[in-house]
């Protein structure tokens, strides 16, 4: 495998660290230059050919690596004669690249199972695969719009209408490209990765895919983010999130657990967070557990809500959580309902399935996708079917704000709590040494 690191940045926001004396990729990180840490991560994933696109004070990067080597890695230096944006310098690396390649911004700290990402890319066969994830500040981030299969439809940039709901999905500055990308770079010119290169590819009908992962990829372009990443690296948190390692998840029901129960939800206006929900999910985000919603949505099968309308509902949920600094690592829904006879029902969804709770299919699917240890995970919901799904999947379980009489349950949850925030506090307190 081959890779290109865009290492031409000046690092204006890091001026208090660089003192305008070193390029951004040479900023010290845990005792060595940031870019050296990145190359070591690539090497650990079997990437042996790496091109560095250098620009501002790039001679320092060249000089540094002329005096030391990273075992098994061949470095190639490509000069960016003038600032060419986030992707323009890729033009100069095309002669070096002979296969699909990884593209990485030079100000990232990351620990990712890249072979898993490459497998996904090869399975889709698109022009590009973008590493995407949710973050705690989507309201001021450039966001990716995707369909339910992960195909990229376009981008919502941070200057968008702030009154509109959004899906919390951010392009993290890491992608895999086919060499077919180079016709979209016919000459060296200032080029934005999203606004120019990828937008042109989408307009031309090329397929671009999103690879959603909770693994750690963070730009450290400010002193605060740099210091935070150093703490997280030293604590082992970053390495633990690599999907080669078994993950823990807190699975959450939606209606009655996260948002106020108001009957079957068919409109975004019905999404109102239960007090304390955002705080609870922020605590999950900080804990190392994944926060994954699993929700039965029989309104789809019954014809009471379209998939497009459900997407709008979930964008409202992302927006309300994101505005309070909380995020979901994923949201999985079951559109099926076995009982027939509803006006306007959709026959293709009126089936017996393996995903509708109390069956464990949604949890099992997430476990496969994210390498989750179900025995070390939790299912939290407000109904017996949620508890039963967790038990059937092998998780621990918590019941909150139940719409049923708890004493009449055929299954017993591990915890009984009034609200999601109460359950999260208890189970995370039990995690403390």
Image (cartoon, rainbow, N blue to C red):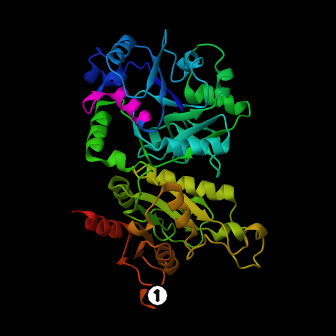
Instruction: Using the image, determine if residue 101 lies above or below residue 302.
Output: above
Drawn side of residue 49 relative to residue 128, left or right:
left
Report the label total. 1
Instruction: Using the image, determine if residue 52 lies above or below residue 262.
Output: above
**Residue at 37% from the left image edge and 11% from the top image edge:** 59
Q: Is residue 204 magenta?
A: no
Q: Nearer the viewer, residue 363 or 380?
A: 363
Query: Which residue sits furthest left?
Result: 433
Q: Secondary structure at mark 1?
A: loop
Residue 88, image quadrant? top right
**Residue at 63% from the left image edge and 59% from the top image edge:** 310
Counting from the top left corner in percent of width and height, residue 187 is at: 63, 13
In this picture, which residue range is highlighted in magenta?
A: 29-43
Query: Which residue sits furthest bottom?
Result: 408
Drawn side of residue 247 relative to residue 422, left or right:
right
Counting from the top left corner in percent of width and height, residue 11 is at: 36, 22
Q: Is residue 31 magenta?
A: yes
**Residue at 35% from the left image edge and 46% from the top image edge:** 239
Counting from the top left corner in percent of width and height, residue 231 is at: 26, 41
Query: Which residue sits furthest top?
Result: 81
Position of the N terminus by quadrant: top right
Instruction: Using the image, determine if residue 96 lies above or below residue 126.
Output: above
**Residue at 64% from the left image edge and 52% from the top image edge:** 148
Q: Which residue position is annotated with label 1? A: 409
Position of the C terminus by quadrant: bottom left
Counting from the top left corner in percent of width and height, residue 418 is at: 36, 75
Mark 1 surroundings: few (<14), some (14-19) or many (≥20) residues within 10 A: some
State whether the magenta stretch is mostly helix, strand or loop.
helix
């Amino acid at each position: 495998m081959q890779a290109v690191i865009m290492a031409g940045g000046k690092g204006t926001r890091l001026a208090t660290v660089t003192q305008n004396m070193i390029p951004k990729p040479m900023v010290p990180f845990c005792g060595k230059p940031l870019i050296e840490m990145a190359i070591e991560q690539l090497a650990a994933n079997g990437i042996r050919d790496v091109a560095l696109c250098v620009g501002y004070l790039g001679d320092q990067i060249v000089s540094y690596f002329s005096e030391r080597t990273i075992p098994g890695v061949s470095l190639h230096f490509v000069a960016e004669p003038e600032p060419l944006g986030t992707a323009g310098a890729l033009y100069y690396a095309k002669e070096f690249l002979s296969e699909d390649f990884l593209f990485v911004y030079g100000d990232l700290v990351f620990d990712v199972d890249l072979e898993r990402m490459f497998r996904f890319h090869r399975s889709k066969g698109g022009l590009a695969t973008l590493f995407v994830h949710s973050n705690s500040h989507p309201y001021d981030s450039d966001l990716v719009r995707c369909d339910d299969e992960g195909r990229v439809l376009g981008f919502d940039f941070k200057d968008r209408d702030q009154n509109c709901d959004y899906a919390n999905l951010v392009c993290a500055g890491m992608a895999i490209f086919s060499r077919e990308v180079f016709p979209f770079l016919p000459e060296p010119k200032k080029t934005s990765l999203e606004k120019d290169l990828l937008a042109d590819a989408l307009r031309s009908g090329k397929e671009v895919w999103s690879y959603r992962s909770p693994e750690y990829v963070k730009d450290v372009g400010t002193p605060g983010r740099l210091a935070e990443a150093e703490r997280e690296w030293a604590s082992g948190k970053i390495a633990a999130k690599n999907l080669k390692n078994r993950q823990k998840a807190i699975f959450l029901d939606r209606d009655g657990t996260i948002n106020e129960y108001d009957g079957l939800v068919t409109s975004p206006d019905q999404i109102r967070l239960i007090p304390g929900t955002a705080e609870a999910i922020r605590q999950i985000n900080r804990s190392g557990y994944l926060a994954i919603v699993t929700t039965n949505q029989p309104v789809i099968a019954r014809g009471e809500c379209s998939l497009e309308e459900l997407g709008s509902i979930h964008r409202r949920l992302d927006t309300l959580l994101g505005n309070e600094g909380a995020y979901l690592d994923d949201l999985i829904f079951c559109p099926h309902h076995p009982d027939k006879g509803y006006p306007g029902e959709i026959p293709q969804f009126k089936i017996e399935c393996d995903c509708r709770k109390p069956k464990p299919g949604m949890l099992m699917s997430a476990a496969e996708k994210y390498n989750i240890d179900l025995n070390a995970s939790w299912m939290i919901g407000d109904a017996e079917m949620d508890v039963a799904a967790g038990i059937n999947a092998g998780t621990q379980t918590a019941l909150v704000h139940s719409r049923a009489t708890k004493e009449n349950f055929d299954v017993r949850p591990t915890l009984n709590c009034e609200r999601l925030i109460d359950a999260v506090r208890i189970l995370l307190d039990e995690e403390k040494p």
